């Protein structure tokens, strides 16, 4: 009987520990989502012989981004690497939604299967280089083109 009581007690302690860990972890997951630099590929359309990509960016990182640029790589339908491009989002104030568009001359949108954020070209906070632009980046898409990290 004593062995059974200690098993029940050990199980109860384990369950309590797991509950505490999950409870303490929950705000962290919400914090990460709330503190994101959210960039959505909102539209991709062919305009005058170019693929026009429209992005909606929202800086929820909690810091003013003085300069923000990303190195983005295109992939074709077969998954082959295409062009390497720099998309400059510029200044992104905290909480501000900004729409930016980029034209890819000589490229039809239906030839692009995905866009990969390969790296940060420039990220400046208070005049100094920062990792927040990649560490807090969250990408989504409303198009047929995948938009990934």
Image (cartoon, rainbow, N blue to C red):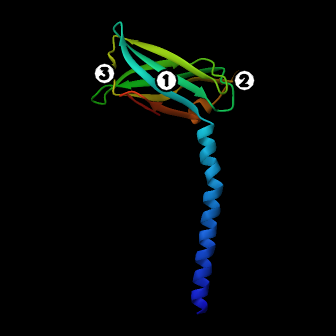
Q: Earlier in the sequence, mark 3 or mark 2?
A: 3
Q: Residues within 10 Å of mark 2 (few under 14, many from 20)?
A: few
Where is residue 11 shown, x and y percent of the image?
58, 76
Q: Residues within 10 Å of mark 3 (few under 14, many from 20)?
A: some
Q: Earlier in the sequence, mark 3 or mark 1?
A: 1
Q: Which mark is residue 59?
A: none
Which residue position holds label 2? 126
Instruction: Answer above or below: position of 143 versus 14.
Output: above
User: Which label sits in the foreground, 3 or 1?
Assistant: 3
Where is residue 57 shown, x and y percent of the image?
55, 25
Residue farthest toward the right in the current orientation of the protein: 126
Residue 147 occupies quadrant: top left
Where is residue 56 shown, x and y percent of the image?
52, 23
Front-lying residue, 107 or 54: 54
User: Would residue 47 be found to the left or right of residue 126 on screen?
Assistant: left
For the residues labelled 3 and 1, say whether their Cβ atoms are less than 8 Å apart: no
Secondary element at image label 2? loop
Secondary element at image label 3? helix
Which residue position holds label 1? 71
For the residues labelled 1 and 2, say whether their Cβ atoms are less than 8 Å apart: no
User: Would residue 51 be found to the left or right of residue 99 on screen?
Assistant: left
Q: Distance from label 3 to label 1 (Cα)? A: 21 Å
Residue 114 occupies quadrant: top left
User: Would residue 59 be found to the left or right of residue 84 on screen?
Assistant: right
Instruction: Answer above or below: position of 68 versus 148.
Output: above
What residue is at 58 percent from the left and 93 percent from the top? 1
User: Which label sits in the foreground, 3 or 2?
Assistant: 3
Residue farthest toward the left in the current orientation of the protein: 78
Which residue position holds label 3? 110
Q: Distance from label 3 to label 2 (Cα)? A: 40 Å
């Amino acid at each position: 009987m004593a062995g059974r009581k200690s098993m029940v007690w050990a199980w109860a302690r384990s369950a309590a520990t797991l509950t505490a860990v999950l409870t303490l972890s929950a705000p962290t997951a919400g914090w990460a989502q709330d503190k994101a630099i959210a960039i959505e590929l909102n539209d991709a359309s062919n305009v005058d012989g170019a693929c026009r990509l429209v992005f909606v960016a929202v800086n929820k990182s909690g810091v003013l981004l003085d300069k923000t640029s990303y190195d983005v790589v295109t992939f074709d339908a077969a998954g082959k690497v295409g062009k390497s491009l720099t998309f400059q989002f510029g200044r992104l104030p905290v909480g501000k939604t900004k729409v930016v568009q980029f034209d890819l001359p000589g490229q039809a949108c239906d030839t692009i299967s995905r866009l990969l954020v390969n790296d940060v070209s420039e990220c400046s906070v208070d005049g100094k280089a920062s990792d927040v632009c990649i560490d807090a980046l969250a990408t989504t898409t409303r198009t047929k083109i995948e938009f990934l990290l």
